[in-house]
Image (tube, coloured by chain):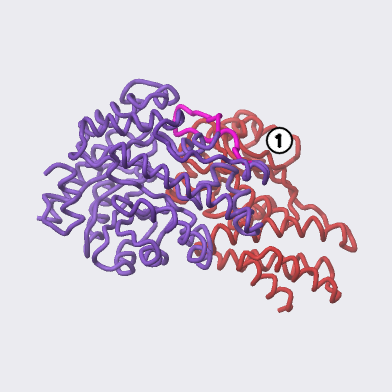
Amino acid sequence: MTPMERLSAVATGKPVDRLPVFCNLLDQGARALGMGIEEYYRSGASVAEAQLRMQRRWGHDNVWALFYVGKEAELLGCRKMVFAEDGPPNVGEWVIRTPEDIHRLQVPTDLADHPAFAETLRCARLLRAEVGGKVPICVYVTSSVTLPAILMGMEAWLGLLLTGPAELRDELLAKCSALVQAEIAAYRAAGADIILYSIPFASPDFLPERLCRSLALPWAARDLAPGGLAGIVYYVGTARMEGMAAEARRQIGVEAFYPSPRDDLRRLRAELGPSPLVAGVLNDIELVRWEPDRIRAEVKALVDALDGGPALFGTMLMPLAVPERSIAVMLEAAYACARRERA
Amino acid sequence: MLEATQDYFEAIHDTDRTGALRAVDEALARGLRPEDVLFQVVLPAIERIRGPEGQACASSLAQQYMAAVIAAELTERMVPLFRSAPAVSCRVVMGNSRGDFHGLGRRIVVGCLRAMLMEVVDLGLNVAPEAFVDAAVSSGARVIGISSMMDHTARGEGGCRAVRRLLQERGLEGTIRLAVGGAPYRFDPEMYRAVGADVWAPDGLSAGQLIARLARGEAA
């Protein structure tokens, strides 16, 4: 089976040779091409080439048209990224410093020709040309309720979100939601199959449940309504979604979930019921120091916990510090367990 | 329990800043002493939001943030009104490791420490290892707290590892303790040893309590 056939079969309850295995290798692409991270992320062709090279090398079931999360701040005017050589870059300036900045914020409605998005879309198109229809092409979109954290800083956003003024908060959320909708449309047009929709602010780890229900999830529904839910995977960052996942499904209608390694998969499955697709996500921060036997045991425990409905094996955003030999052991174990469990 | 204690806690729990400040103002109007506002209203709310020691904090980040930031604000308001100036027991240096621009967790820790009447030298974001050590030496701090939200800023050479090395080089290891916190440590509770820290905490309020104990010279 091709990775796309495997994923489609799992999602529709048909037989598969093994569970899909998603391995989220991003910054590793720079090493694969022998480049520095800043140079690497200047070119959509580089990112596409590295994604293809890594997928061929490791055999996992996805590729990414993802540069770094701060790209979305660039779409709204951020001109400074702080690059590192051992990890992803950070936003280096806040687009929003005053309430007037929110009023002035201009949201591009058509991203197809936006200079800050050109390389990302180029990457997606190159991936589509090479592996479209065979390997799921993944993209990452930050939800409207989370995006302000990279535009004004987490503390300022939390302050506005919690204490208002509500009109200003909603003005910002409406603009962010418009960007999310435009991103999703542009990504789909460029060939994206999987849209990882990131909404940490809908996790009870971030906000009290009352605000998850009454604020975060209604904005999520608004973000996703125009484009529909095809390929949308619900993700609350590395925070836990337990306790709010069923509510997300009810309010948004989403049917695929990418939880945190800190979620209890059996409790999550019980909360969601048998039909949604649920990923089992390995703790790839601990993976940095695990020895091979521990890796195999952790992978097996994770796959064992995926019974009860459609599932895939996945990683978080693999740190560069994960040794290559550990990636190899993890993937070999995942392929073996996923096959054995489905045999 | 004072009526204000419960009202204030409920407001913090609901992330209702206005309600929290109103509870305090009403208590003061009823004659509650500023000392009691801090020690019987504000600090107990932090402990309740934090939850039982030894267990994971069940409160959301927003609730922790609200508890810590309002606590720091009220401490600044109340302390000048105390009948006698409280002794500032200990000093702590706080900052985000070099290359780290995620300040929320640090702000929670700093707010919590200030409400416990610790003197905090807050170096902010993206702090060089030398700056941590220099600030600790010049201020006489007993603890350096380093916050990191990304794997590479926690584990890399711009963070705790380098601070530990500097403490060794300058013969300060017995004098200054190192505490770390942030998301990567929560995903790998053993990471603090690998980077040379003495202790770690899984959330901002726990970190505040832990660092306060370290600064007082108590066992962590």
Residue A82 lies within the magenta run: yes
Q: Residue shown at 57%/49% (left/top)?
A: A172
In what quadrant of the picture does the C terminus of chain B appear? bottom right
Q: Secondary structure at mark 1?
A: helix
User: Would you say residue A216 is visible in this rendering?
Assistant: yes
Figure check: B117 above or below A43: below
Answer with left or right where residue A11 lies relative to residue A250: left
Q: Residue shown at 64%/32% (left/top)?
A: B171
Q: Amino acid at mark 1?
A: Ala
Camera-nearest residue between B195 and A179:
A179
Camera-nearest residue between A282 and A109:
A109
Residue of label 1: B135
Image coords of residue B49 (percent x, y): 60, 66
What shade does chain B have? red
Residue A334 lies within the magenta run: no
Camera-nearest residue between B203 and A157:
A157
Image coords of residue A97 (percent x, y): 66, 41
In what quadrant of the picture does the N terminus of chain B appear? bottom right
Answer with left or right where residue B65 lies relative to residue A143: right
Image coords of residue A282 (percent x, y): 32, 49
What is the chief secondary structure element of the magenta stretch? loop
Q: Which residues are magenta?
A: A78-96
Image coords of residue A16 (percent x, y): 12, 52
Q: Chain of mark 1?
A: B
User: Would you say residue B54 is visible in this rendering?
Assistant: no
